[in-house]
Image (cartoon, rainbow, N blue to C red):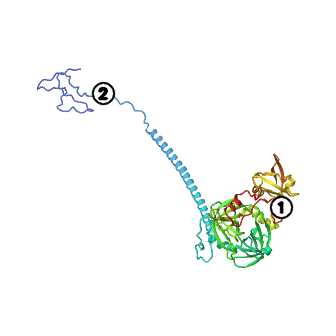
């Protein structure tokens, strides 16, 4: 390397190299030396200076990336399209299901509207419309009392019975067929030599007693007429305590049918009438003498009971006892009505015994009828009946109630206390004789419902043990 002289004050260097073409000329007046005199002179621009070649570049991958991007975009588009198709199908299925469900609900709603409209049409009253009952507005439980009266009063009749030289008695009944069959109580026509029936329109007919049953206090009459308006029969089993009911009848022999309104106060009440124990509906609808045998309606205008008796009187303190009436449940007598129509009597199971409560437990057998079911079973006078089938017998009343669950020809076990042991006997029930007289199985110590009395009379009647000594 060549040595250059150092600069002296006021002396410029003589070096003036000419760069080669590829390089730019050195700037004018530029000093090639450092400010410090001890530092070597800046290297000049040399002609034909060596420039290192650039490193060779690898083949471009740009085209590969482009194809991958295109392929990815294609796959994405395909997936999006497929997803949109699936989503569209799912959405379409969802709304189609919603539409079908809406159609079902609409159809169901339409059916309910038609049913309600039919009920309104059935319950409508076509009378003079001068009262609130003349409108078609009904409560949730059915017709109004006025509508029930308007619809059903033409089917209710007054009954007058002539009983030999004893005079006449009055009661009520209701028409159950357009050709003149009428239902009433047995005690309304019991012992009658002639019976007449008067309709709501005032027409009077001579009536024939087609059949009667004292055990169920049921009587079937027939008048010669056609085209009569008859009642609809409902179900007493469907009733609940608190249901509103309407009684229509001819109390005290009145010529005009009257209406009383009340509620079902109780069900399955055991009441003794004319020696028989009956299962009864209790109501606070007023039932008086002359109402017996008349219909008790629900608020649909259906007969659900036959009004039979009332409980009234005074307590020991002088307080009045009112608003306790009884009706025979319709479901208890439906099959018996058909028997009266077909046979003129009701077939009932029969033991052939006389019992009372003298022992204080069970039913004491006073006597056994020769040839009866009881004698054939081995029951003896002096036995104490303590069970009949699945029914425990604690008193005479329990026997009458238990017998209502059996039919003619049924076989069951009767348990009696004899001596110091319990004896189980098998008994098959025969058919009760077709007389209207009470059977010998009627409690000899029983009491019939008093027509009036003080508190103690009624207490003994409803809650006493039936033993009158």
377, 51: nearer the viewer: 377
Q: Please tell me which of labels 1 and 2 falls first in the chain.
A: 2
Residue at image mark 2: 50
**Residue at image point 43% right, 38% down:** 62
Number of numbered discs visible in the structure rendering: 2
Q: Residue 352 appears at what percent x and percent y? A: 84, 58
**410 sits to left or right of 462:** right
Residue at image mark 1: 432
- The quadrant of the image that shows the C terminus is bottom right
Name above or below for residue 8 compared with residue 127: above
Secondary structure at numbered mark 2: loop
Give the image quarter of residue 184: bottom right
Name above or below for residue 411 compared with residue 193: above
283, 12: nearer the viewer: 283
Q: Residue 67 appears at what percent x and percent y? A: 47, 41
Q: Residue 303 appears at what percent x and percent y? A: 69, 67
Mark 1 and mark 2: Cα distance apart in space: 146 Å
Give the image quarter of residue 121: bottom right
The circle on residue 333 is none
**Residue at image point 48% right, 42% down:** 72
Q: Residues within 10 Å of mark 1 (few under 14, many from 20)?
A: some
Secondary structure at numbered mark 1: loop
Q: Is residue 121 visible?
A: no
Mark 1 or mark 2, whichever is nearer to me: 1
- The quadrant of the image that shows the N terminus is top left
């Amino acid at each position: 390397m060549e040595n250059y002289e150092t600069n002296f004050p006021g002396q410029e260097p003589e070096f003036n190299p000419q760069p080669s073409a590829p390089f730019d000329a050195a700037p004018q007046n530029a000093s090639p030396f450092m400010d410090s005199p001890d530092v070597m002179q800046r290297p000049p621009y040399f002609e034909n200076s060596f420039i290192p070649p650039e490193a060779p570049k690898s083949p471009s991958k740009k085209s590969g990336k482009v194809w991958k991007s295109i392929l990815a975009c294609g796959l994405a588009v395909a997936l999006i399209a497929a997803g949109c198709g699936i989503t569209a199908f799912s959405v379409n299925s969802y709304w189609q299901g919603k539409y079908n469900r809406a159609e079902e609900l609409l159809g169901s709603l339409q059916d309910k509207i038609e049913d309600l409209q039919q009920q309104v049409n059935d319950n409508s009253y076509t009378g003079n419309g001068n009262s609130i009952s003349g409108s078609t507005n009904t409560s949730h439980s059915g017709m109004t009392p006025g509508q029930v009266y308007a619809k059903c009063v033409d089917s209710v009749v007054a009954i007058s019975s002539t009983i030999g030289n004893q005079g006449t008695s009055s009661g009520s009944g209701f028409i159950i067929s357009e050709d003149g069959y009428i239902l009433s109580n047995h005690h309304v026509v019991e012992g009658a030599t002639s019976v007449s029936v008067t309709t709501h329109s005032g027409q009077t007919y001579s009536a024939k007693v087609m059949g009667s049953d004292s055990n169920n206090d049921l009587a079937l009459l027939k008048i010669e007429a056609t085209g009569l308006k008859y009642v609809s029969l409902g179900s007493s089993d469907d009733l609940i305590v608190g249901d509103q009911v309407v009684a229509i009848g001819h109390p005290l022999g009145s010529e005009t049918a009257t209406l009383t309104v009340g509620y079902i106060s109780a069900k399955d009440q055991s009441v003794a009438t004319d020696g028989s124990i009956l299962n009864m509906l209790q109501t606070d609808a007023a039932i008086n003498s002359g109402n017996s045998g008349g219909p008790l309606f629900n608020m649909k205008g259906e007969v659900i009971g036959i009004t039979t008796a009332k409980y009234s009187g005074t307590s020991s303190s002088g307080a009045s006892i009112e608003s306790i009436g009884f009706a025979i449940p319709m479901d208890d007598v439906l099959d018996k009505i058909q028997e009266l129509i077909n046979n003129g009597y009701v077939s009932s199971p029969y033991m052939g015994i006389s019992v009372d409560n003298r022992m204080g437990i069970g039913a004491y057998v006073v006597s056994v009828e020769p040839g009866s079911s009881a004698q054939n079973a081995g029951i003896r006078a002096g036995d104490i009946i303590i069970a009949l089938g699945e029914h425990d017998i604690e008193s005479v009343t329990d026997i009458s109630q238990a017998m209502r669950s059996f039919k003619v020809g049924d076989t069951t076990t009767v348990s009696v206390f004899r001596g110091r042991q319990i004896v189980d006997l098998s008994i098959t029930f025969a058919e009760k004789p077709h007389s209207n007289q009470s059977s010998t199985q009627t409690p000899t110590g029983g009491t019939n419902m008093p027509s009036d009395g003080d508190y103690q009379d009624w207490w003994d009647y409803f809650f006493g043990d039936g033993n009158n000594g």
